[in-house]
């Protein structure tokens, strides 16, 4: 619908405003540009004659991105401009070589590799969808998320074409409780359990955890979540004082916080209880009678989750470590399916909401996690990378000490980076939904018919053949 007609109809299509938000801390360049000076000097000499001294043309060669256009040209290449297109080395292999910068490769860790860091940095600085012009040249299968493929081969309605579709694709998700059936008395009034949920515009929540204890991080998360109409999950102490973003803040309450719940200063729409605790549950219910209470716990015991649901918990925030592993070493992809299946088998999947965190570090992991059974993803480490945090070694455990934030981190910049990241991830989600012909993201949850698993396909094709061993 054109904008003026939308306004007349009182309708507003959800949109995330993006703006360039370049890095505030200088990161090592992606590529090292190695130039043999004699070769370059010969080229320049011949070009001076050929282009009759036209300095702008000569200095733009052989790179249109300005790598060789500094004050001394290619004798001191401006590596930060290199996009790795390889034109220079293709044209002049005798004196130009492009290599990955080992310093850049040190950003991230063994799970959040520098390729993911690069991707997040691009998404957060531009708000755009990363495009690999030469096509994807990587592997088509692997471990973890790479062992799952999505099936988009269904016939797709042409109007439903992702980001630019004429027909809106909704990314709204509901957090809370919806009963399997509504019941009414003789007077037509509803009886029994009634729905109790809130709707947010994105299946992306911001998971602060201990990481939000640093600097302005909690405020940046809360403000961005409020402006995007989603939620930021923050430790109780960090949530205090964020009343202006009350509708977007989800405080995480531990037993030691129980005596001072009134200090929060506002009535949150959702509260997370850190681990099951009868007394704490009663206290939170009394303090915030309107709030939806979510249980924050590990993925490990799917059967226990069903038990908690029977005791009144309808929203679960399930946590794996930052490498997507449970305490017993299983990967989050399998853990989500296990939790989802447990509720399906108990006949109450429609009644509960499953949120998940840990190991979901790229836009494509979000739809995959939802297909496996999550309602929404509470994103953790990618937010920090978007804020240019550096990894201090390996960071699997949920511990803030694994990260260092830039010393000049400021709120306005941080908010824009997170908005850009959310916009980029949402656009990529819309592309996937469009390709699957889905009109809303809620239909994606548990849609296992869209998933293919490398392990299963390989077993179907090769089991029984000499040399075949089943992947883990
Ligand atoms: S690889 Fe491409 S961007 Fe990098 S220096 Fe060469 S021509 Fe320029």
Image (cartoon, helix red, strand yellow):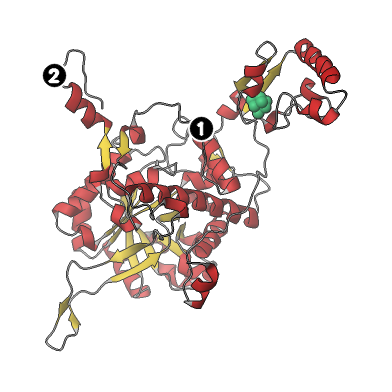
**Marks 2, 1: nearer the viewer:** 2
> Image height check: is 124 above or below 256?
above
Extreme-bottom residue of the structure: 187
Q: Residue 75 or 117: which is nearer the viewer?
A: 75
**Where's residue 236, x and y in %?**
46, 61
**Where's residue 306, x and y in %?**
19, 55
Instruction: Determine the quadrant in which ligand 1 lies.
Output: top right
Horizontally, is 339 left or right of 187 in the view?
right
Q: Which residue is mark 1?
A: 115
**Quadrant of res 375:** bottom left
Q: Residue 433 or 391: which is nearer the viewer?
A: 433
SS label for mark 1: helix
Q: Earlier in the sequence, mark 2 or mark 1?
A: 1
The residue carrying pointer 1 sits among few (fewer than 14), some (14 to 19) or many (20 or more) residues within 10 Å by Cα, namely some
**Where's residue 166, x and y in %?**
43, 59
SS label for mark 2: loop
Residue 44 seen by the camera: yes
CA gap, disc 2 and disc 1: 37 Å
Horizontally, is 384 left or right of 342 in the view?
right
User: Which quadrant: the C terminus?
Assistant: top left
**Quadrant of res 220:** bottom right
**Quadrant of res 72:** top right
Extreme-left residue of the structure: 186
> Image height check: is 422 above or below 466?
below
**Where's residue 394, x and y in %?**
48, 32
Horizontally, is 364 left or right of 95 in the view?
left
Residue 299 seen by the camera: no
Q: Which residue is mark 2?
A: 464
């Amino acid at each position: 619908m054109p904008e003026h007609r939308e306004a007349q109809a009182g309708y507003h299509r959800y949109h995330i405003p993006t703006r360039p938000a370049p890095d505030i801390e200088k990161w090592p360049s992606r590529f090292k540009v190695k130039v043999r000076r004699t070769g370059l000097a010969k080229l320049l000499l011949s070009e001076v004659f050929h282009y009759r001294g036209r300095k702008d043309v000569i200095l733009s060669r052989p790179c249109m991105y300005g790598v060789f256009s500094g004050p001394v040209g290619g004798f001191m290449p401006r590596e930060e401009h290199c996009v790795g297109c390889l034109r220079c080395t293709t044209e002049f292999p005798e004196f130009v070589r492009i290599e990955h910068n080992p310093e850049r490769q040190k950003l991230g860790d063994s799970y959040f590799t520098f390729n993911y860091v690069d991707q997040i940095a691009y998404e957060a600085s531009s708000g755009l969808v990363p495009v690999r012009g030469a096509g994807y040249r990587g592997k088509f299968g692997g471990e973890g998320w790479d062992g799952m493929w999505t099936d988009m081969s269904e016939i797709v309605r042409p109007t439903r074409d992702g980001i630019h579709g004429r027909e809106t694709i909704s990314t709204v998700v509901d957090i809370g409780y919806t009963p399997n059936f509504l019941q009414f008395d003789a007077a037509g009034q509803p009886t029994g359990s009634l729905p109790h949920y809130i709707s947010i515009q994105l299946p992306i929540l911001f998971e602060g955890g201990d990481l939000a204890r640093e600097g302005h991080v909690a405020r940046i998360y809360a403000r961005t979540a409020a402006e995007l109409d989603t939620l930021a999950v923050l430790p109780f102490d960090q949530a205090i004082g964020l009343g202006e973003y009350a509708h977007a803040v989800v405080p995480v309450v531990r037993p030691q916080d129980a005596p001072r719940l009134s200090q929060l200063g506002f009535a949150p729409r959702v509260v997370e209880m850190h681990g099951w605790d009868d007394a704490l549950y009663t206290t939170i219910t009394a303090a915030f009678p309107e709030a939806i209470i979510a249980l924050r716990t590990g993925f490990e015991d799917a059967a226990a989750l069903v038990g908690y649901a029977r005791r009144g918990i309808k929203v679960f925030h399930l946590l794996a470590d930052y490498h997507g592993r449970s305490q017993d070493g299983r990967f989050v992809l399998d853990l989500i399916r296990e939790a989802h299946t447990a509720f399906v088998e108990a006949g109450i999947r429609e009644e509960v909401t499953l949120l998940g965190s840990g190991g979901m570090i790229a836009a494509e992991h979000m739809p995959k996690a939802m297909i496996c059974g999550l309602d929404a993803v509470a994103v953790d480490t990618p937010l920090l990378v978007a804020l240019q945090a550096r990894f201090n070694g390996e960071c699997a455990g949920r511990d803030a000490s694994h990260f260092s934030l830039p010393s000049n981190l400021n709120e306005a910049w941080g908010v824009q980076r997170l908005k850009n990241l959310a916009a980029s991830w949402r656009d990529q989600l819309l592309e996937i939904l469009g390709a699957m012909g889905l009109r809303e993201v809620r239909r994606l949850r548990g849609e296992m018919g869209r998933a293919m698993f490398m392990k299963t396909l390989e077993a179907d094709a090769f089991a029984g053949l000499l040399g075949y061993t089943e992947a883990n």
